[in-house]
């Protein structure tokens, strides 16, 4: 079964606390992912392809989970590649 293709462009909102919101916004700008961020408002992101979706997931994950959990996740990834 083939997964459904993403629509040509999808707008999403990411609601994060203030400092995390600006950190994610800055990183998405660096990745050239179209986004808008206003004071006290969620980040509005335009997703146009699966790669952007994965990048957005990765960036938000880095600020929403604890460093210990992130370290464990990376450790598990390294174990998978060394087998």
Image: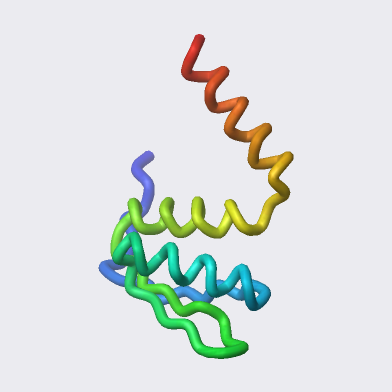
Residue name at image x 45 percent, y 59 percent: 56
User: In the drawing, does residue 64 fall left or right of residue 47?
Assistant: right
At a point 52% along the width and 76% down the height, the residue shown is 13
- As drawn, the residue found furthest toward the bottom would be 39
Q: Quadrant of residue 14?
A: bottom right
Seen at 61% across and 68% down, the residue is: 20
Residue located 36% across and 73% down the image: 46
The vertical placement of 2 against 52, above or below, is: above
Q: How many marks?
A: 0
Left of 8 or right of it: where is 25? right
Q: Is 29 in front, or is 46?
A: 29
**Residue at the left extreme?**
8
Q: Say which quadrant the N terminus sits in.
A: top left
Q: How is the image coloured?
A: rainbow
Q: Percent position (x, y) of residue 82? A: 49, 12
In the rendered image, which quarter is residue 11 located in?
bottom left
Considering every residue shown, the one lying at the far top of the view is: 83
Percent of width and height locating residue 49: 30, 58
Query: Residue 35 placed where, x, y %?
Result: 39, 76
Residue 69 drawn above or below residue 57? above
């Amino acid at each position: 079964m083939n997964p459904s293709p993403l629509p040509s462009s999808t707008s999403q909102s990411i609601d994060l606390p203030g400092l995390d919101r600006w950190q994610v916004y800055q990183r998405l700008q660096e990745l050239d992912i179209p986004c808008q961020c206003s004071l006290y408002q969620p980040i509005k992101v335009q997703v146009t392809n699966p790669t952007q979706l994965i990048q957005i997931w990765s960036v938000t994950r880095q600020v929403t989970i604890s460093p210990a959990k992130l370290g464990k996740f990376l450790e598990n990834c390294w174990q998978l590649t060394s087998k």
